[in-house]
Amino acid sequence: MVNQKAYELGSKRSVIREIFEYAKKRSEEIGAENVFDFSIGNPSVPAPAAVNETICRLVTQTPSVALHGYTSAQGDKTVRDTIAAKLQSRFGVEITGDLLYMICGAAASLTIALHALTVNEGDEFIVFAPFFTEYRVFVEGAGAKLIALPSNEALLPDFKALKSALNPRVRGVLINSPNNPSGVVYGQNTLEELAEILRAASKEYGQPIYLISDEPYRELIYDETTKVPFPMTVYDDTVVCYSYSKALSLPGERIGYIAVSPKAKEKSKLYAAVCGAGRKLGFVCAPALFQRVAAECDGLTGDLSVYKKNRDLLYGILTDCGFSCVYPDGAFYLFMKSPEADAYAFCERAKKYGLLFVPSDDFGCKGFVRIAYCVATERIESAKKRFEMLAKEYGLQ
Ligand code: PLP
């Protein structure tokens, strides 16, 4: 006998993985040059040089036992203190290393945060569509219920819907900015309005409603005018789930952290619950070498000018073709309106031209596709003609 829920999850791939696998198969059949795989958010720029330099230095200069041995369950103290000091200087928050928990990327940090905050079976966590497909798995895995609310036209939270969804079972609101799949960034005003609503509801129910901020794309913004406010500076009861997967182009190395706000009312209890959830789920002592690499390279990024170039090129091609797109301020995804109501059907048609995107249905909203532009720029240039042919099929050109 096996656990039915785990069996079901494990025997079915996510729609993104499904398309990614299809791309590999198709490349073998018709040649990789004829397959334009815009399905997956795998960083296409190399890690900054400092990453490999740091690895080489650490490996050659640190005694092996010290370098590769267990760290504290919540992460090496020097690592946590270093990252906390950087958060202090970047965002002006009074955070210390004893509120940080080093962890294997955002997926694990979200899982832990959700377990730490779920009090009773059926507690609720609110997200705004479109949202990262795995949120449902993480929330339900913690024994809670995912409440998916709509966004407004600009794909920012629908605050009216939020006000009517809040109730004493809501433990937290989970946001992701810059957003996967839309590329939208929540600005200061959006966060302040959200914070005001959560403060009022927390007061009414006599318990904090947490803001959980999923931030793997924090540094991936392309215009000087785009600012990503640090949620802890706006709302006290915040937990940040950060990952180095995208900024440092290290998704396979599995490193990130959870940061509990120093102003959270229950900060010590919450931090202990994070440690307890990590222990319960077996997420202790994140990869030791990469904890140290993260501490030294925190705040650096790969060459973001490549993503900016890709974004501008792709947005230009698609809008010239007559497609309607959400302008992406950050991350490396472009959200495009499907020219037919059924985004799956549109993706099937695009496949005929070797163009592979992800239909928006699994992101909690219908009628869009996600196009990941973390690819070689040449792939976007070569895809231009195919986008034009696709647009013609819909009479857009
Ligand atoms: N959250 C979002 C919004 C993501 O897009 C991803 C990965 O693509 C994750 C979390 C998981 O990231 P990680 O690789 O750090 O586990």
Image (cartoon, rainbow, N blue to C red):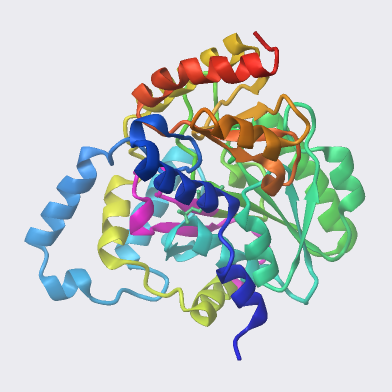
User: Does the magenta-highlighted stretch encompass residue 367?
Assistant: no
Pinpoint residue 247: horizontal percent, then vertical percent. Answer: 39, 41
User: Which residue: 66% across, 31% down?
Assistant: 188
Vertical order, 227 against 77 (above or below): above
Residue sticking out furthest to the bottom: 1
User: Which residue: 52% across, 46% down?
Assistant: 19
Vertical order, 305 against 253 (above or below): above
Pinpoint residue 279: horizontal percent, then vertical percent. Answer: 49, 80
- Residue nearest the observer in this picture, 140 or 291: 140
User: Would residue 223 be seen by someone viewing this image from the given angle?
Assistant: no
Pinpoint residue 370: horizontal percent, then vertical percent. Answer: 59, 35
Residue 397 falls in image quadrant = top right
Vertical order, 20 against 345 (above or below): below
User: Would residue 321 be seen by someone viewing this image from the given angle?
Assistant: yes
Residue sticking out furthest to the front: 29
Task: Tell me where the magenta segment starts and ends, as one range.
Answer: 241-270
User: Which residue: 32% across, 35% down?
Assistant: 45
User: Which residue: 48% across, 47% down?
Assistant: 22
- Residue nearest the observer in this picture, 324 or 115: 324
Residue sticking out furthest to the right: 164
User: Does the magenta-highlighted stretch encompass residue 249?
Assistant: yes
Residue 334 falls in image quadrant = top right
Pinpoint residue 275: horizontal percent, then vertical percent. Answer: 51, 74
Quadrant of the drawing holding the N terminus: bottom right
Residue sticking out furthest to the left: 60
- Residue nearest the observer in this picture, 394 or 29: 29
Task: Give the side of residue 280 with respect to residue 299, left or right.
Answer: right
Total labels: the figure holds 0
- Residue nearest the observer in this picture, 279 or 348: 348
